[in-house]
Amino acid sequence: LMSALTSGPLSLDMTNSSQVRNGAATVLVRAIAAVSCLANVGGEDFVPFYGSTMPGLLGCAYFGLELDHASGCVHPVSPQALSHELSMLRGAALESATIVGEAIGEDNAAMYRSDAEKIMVLALALLKAPADQKAADVIIPMDQLLAGCARVANVIKDDYAPFLPYVLPRLLNRAKEEADISVTDGDESGLEASKRGNLDRDDDEGTESVTVALPGMGTKK
């Protein structure tokens, strides 16, 4: 399965934006999710595949972005880079890269350290943005970014200390936020769509919804 993934969807040249079109990002997100699952289950047995998967995951995490080394900020290379599809791709890739790094175990932490630094360079570029700006969330969903930072901390231990002044304030702000969620009555069509993994997105309102069947409560959205 790993051979099929690395020679198939994960073999795309992420420096060539023309390759990621016509639904390719959606295929990549699913391939990346498969890598996360395999790394979680395989643990240290995933080490032989590390070299063939991590560069692609990092390439996807940075896809559509340009890093300004002088300022430490990242900028989208085009308006299309801020699309929902590419935001999900970058979030899935960063999430998977940190899952892989954590899965291979502390005995292999040295292998992961330089890649962990690349992940944190991207994370800090987004975390340094003012908290009231939503740009970072558009580039990579903040929940995935913060969860990834936590996994990096779990692996590199004391070496994570320099990143704390940027990560902890965001975590505290996140903990204080009220959940922006509502529950309404759903319908069977929405339930069937959710079962197929399709989210109901309202781009005008900036919302996403999923329909579920709750015992004793019926169908809720």
Image: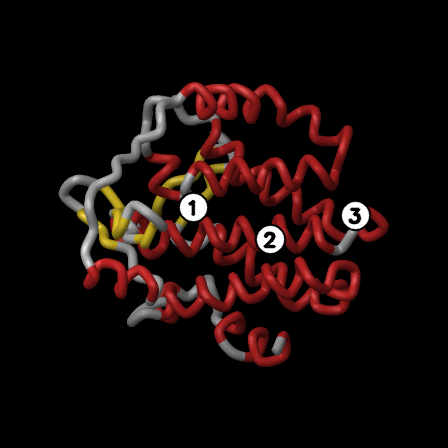
- Residue under the point 78% across and 65% down: 45
Is the Cβ of the residue at disc 1 closer than 8 Å to that at disc 2?
A: no
- The answer to which of marks 1 and 3 sits earlier in the sequence is 1
Point out which mark residue 207 bears: none
Q: Position of residue 117 (x, y in %)?
A: 65, 41
Q: Position of residue 139 (x, y in %)?
A: 38, 43
Mark 2, secondary structure of its residue: helix
Quarter location, residue 121: top right
- Residue under the point 52% across and 63% down: 32
- Considering depth in this image, is 106 or 159 the residue closer to the camera? 106
Identified by mark 2, the residue type is: Ala
Q: How is the image coloured?
A: secondary structure
- The answer to which of marks 1 and 2 sits earlier in the sequence is 1
Identified by mark 3, the residue type is: Ala
Point out which mark residue 109 bears: 3
Q: Position of residue 140 (x, y in %)?
A: 42, 43
Within 10 Å of the Cα at label 3, are there few (<14), some (14-19), or many (20+) other Cα atoms? some
Mark 3, secondary structure of its residue: helix
The residue carrying mark 2 is: 97
Identified by mark 1, the residue type is: Glu
- Residue under the point 38% across and 64% down: 25
- Considering depth in this image, is 15 or 100 the residue closer to the camera? 100
Q: Does 74 sit left or right of 191 as displayed?
A: right
What is the residue that sits farthest to the right in this orientation? 107
The residue carrying mark 1 is: 66
Quarter location, residue 181: top left
Is the Cβ of the residue at disc 1 closer than 8 Å to that at disc 3?
A: no
